[in-house]
Structures are given as structure tokens and as C-alpha cells.
């Protein structure tokens, strides 16, 4: 479905944010993209979706192919029409509009009849939004805003849904609910999911495959269940040291990565 091959992304013609990154997402699969802050994860999603230009970012090399079609150079609305949609970090709702108005904005590429069907589908996924449909979205809780953001992305009936830190700042119960819905979209509807997430444990628990980025490069990848057992991943991203003891995440972040990761 989605294939990135040796992608290079540069900001201001000077800062190389992504270096020869390669990854793939298949139909009906969940792929977790993990890494510390500044590793290049969000930049990778922005490159796929064609929204690098507000920050003077540019794809300088490599290929981004979605269902056999190159995406590099396409405007964002055309990329949405191909079936690839992103839920950005921070939700980015139209906070002066109501819940339903936000959803309608997400369905601008669809016919009125299709948009109506998609709204009904969104409300079935997020029933707590039904009673909030006329509420101005800026007054919603963080969890409800995230549900609207995901629902808005689903309005275009995507084949590939990309989520950038969907559980950031959310309560554990809401986090579990959102992950359950993400898994349902994949398993029942055959949607491809590319998930950028700081909560590596939960992301790998629902994912089929995982990639880890460091300094703009993919340094490790493999089946999610295997990565959960990988000593490096457990130590650096899940916080477990030798013998299963819990390590301080501050120590983990500054711990020198094994050289074989970057060889």
C-alpha cells in the first residue's frame, strides 16, 4: 500500500531531518513508528501528506509510493483524494466550529450523500460525540477533541490513516478507547494504519510491525511482538534494564545507543 524508499527531507535547504528512511505499510496492518523527540517521525508523516511547505521543508531524495502512485510533489488535497490522510499532533481542530462542522470540513472531498454516511459512521465509532455534535469543539475535553480529529480524518474514507501522537496528554482510559478504535478500523475495515506514538508499549501491543527512528534514520525494524522482546527496545523505549528492572527514562534517553544499531 505505502512504500517509502530512501527518503530524504531537508528544512531550509540546510537541516537534514530525515535521512534515507525506508518503511512500508500494508493494507489491513498497523505499523508503529517510534523514536524520541526530534527523531524525524512527524516530519516523515508530513512528507507523506505533502504538508512540509509551511515549515520550508522539502523532499530532496527517495520515493514515496502509495498504491503505485508517487506522492512527492502532489498538493495535500490531491493526496487526501488518493486515500492517505493524517491526524496531526495536537489535533488542530477548527476550535470555533462545532463538532459536526469539523466533521463536515473533513468530508469536503466526498459527495453530500457519502459525507452523510461517513458522519453516521463516525458517530457509531465515537458515540459520546453524538450529544456533543452542536458543541463548539474548543470547549471539548482533550479526549473528545482527539475523537473529533480522528473522526474528521475518517470523513474522507481513507485507505491509509496516519496518526501523530494520538494519545498525547490523554487519560489512560481514553487512550485505551482510542487504541481499541484504531485496531478495529484496521481489523474490520482493512484500513492501513501508520502510528507515531510515544507510548511504545501500547503501540507495539496493537501493531503488526514496528520501526524505530534515531536522528532521522530508521535504525531498527521488525515484527511488533519480536520488538517487544528485543532487549534494546525494552531498555531504551520500554524502560526495562537488565534483569527486568525498571530504568529511569531520563537515564534511558541519554544512554549511549549500541553501535550495531547505527552500523
Image: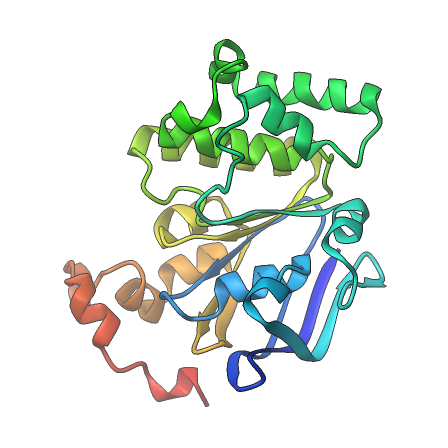
Residue 21: percent from left, percent from top = 59, 75
Of 214 and 141, nearer the camera is: 141
Q: Is residue 235 visible?
A: yes
Residue 5: percent from left, percent from top = 69, 75
Q: Residue at x 53, y 12 (%)?
A: 130
Residue 58: percent from left, percent from top = 64, 74
Q: Residue at x 43, y 29 (%)?
A: 138
Q: Across the whole image, how many numbered discs are drawn on residues? A: 0
Residue 53 relative to residue 132: left or right: right
Residue 239 relative to residue 109: left or right: left
Q: Residue at x 36, y 65 (%)?
A: 37
Residue 53: percent from left, percent from top = 63, 66
The quadrant in which the N terminus is found is: bottom right
Indicate whether 244 appears above or below 77.
below
Q: Residue at x 29, y 33 (%)?
A: 171
Indicate whether 160 appears above or below 122.
below
Q: Is residue 52 visible?
A: no
Q: Residue furthest top?
A: 131
Identify the image quadrant of residue 121: top right
Indicate whether 122 appears above or below 92.
above
Amino acid at each position: 500500500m505505502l512504500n517509502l524508499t530512501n527518503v530524504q527531507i531537508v528544512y531550509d535547504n540546510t537541516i537534514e531531518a530525515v535521512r534515507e528512511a525506508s518503511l512500508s505499510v500494508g493494507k489491513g496492518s498497523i505499523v508503529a513508528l517510534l523514536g524520541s523527540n526530534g527523531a524525524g517521525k512527524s516530519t516523515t508523516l508530513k512528507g507523506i501528506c505533502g504538508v512540509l511547505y509551511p515549515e520550508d521543508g522539502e523532499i530532496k531524495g527517495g520515493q514515496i509510493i502509495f498504491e503505485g502512485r508517487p506522492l512527492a510533489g502532489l498538493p495535500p488535497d490531491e493526496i487526501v483524494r488518493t486515500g492517505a490522510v493524517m491526524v496531526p499532533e495536537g489535533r488542530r481542530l477548527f476550535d470555533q466550529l462545532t463538532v459536526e462542522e469539523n466533521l463536515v470540513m473533513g468530508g469536503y472531498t466526498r459527495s453530500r450523500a457519502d459525507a452523510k454516511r461517513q458522519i453516521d459512521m463516525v458517530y457509531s465509532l465515537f458515540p459520546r460525540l453524538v450529544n456533543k455534535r452542536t458543541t463548539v469543539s474548543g470547549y471539548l475535553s482533550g479526549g473528545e477533541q482527539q475523537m473529533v480529529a480522528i473522526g474528521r480524518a475518517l470523513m474522507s474514507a481513507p485507505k491509509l490513516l496516519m496518526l501523530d501522537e494520538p494519545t498525547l496528554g490523554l487519560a489512560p482510559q481514553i487512550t485505551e478507547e482510542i487504541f481499541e478504535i484504531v485496531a478495529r478500523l484496521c481489523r474490520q475495515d482493512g484500513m492501513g494504519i501508520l502510528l507515531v506514538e510515544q507510548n511504545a508499549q501500547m503501540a507495539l501491543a496493537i501493531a503488526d510491525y514496528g520501526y524505530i527512528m534515531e536522528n532521522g534514520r530508521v535504525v531498527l525494524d521488525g515484527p511488533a511482538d519480536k520488538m517487544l522482546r528485543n532487549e534494546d527496545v525494552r531498555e531504551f523505549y520500554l524502560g526495562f534494564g537488565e534483569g527486568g528492572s525498571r530504568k529511569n527514562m531520563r537515564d534511558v534517553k541519554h544512554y549511549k545507543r549500541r553501535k550495531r544499531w547505527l552500523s
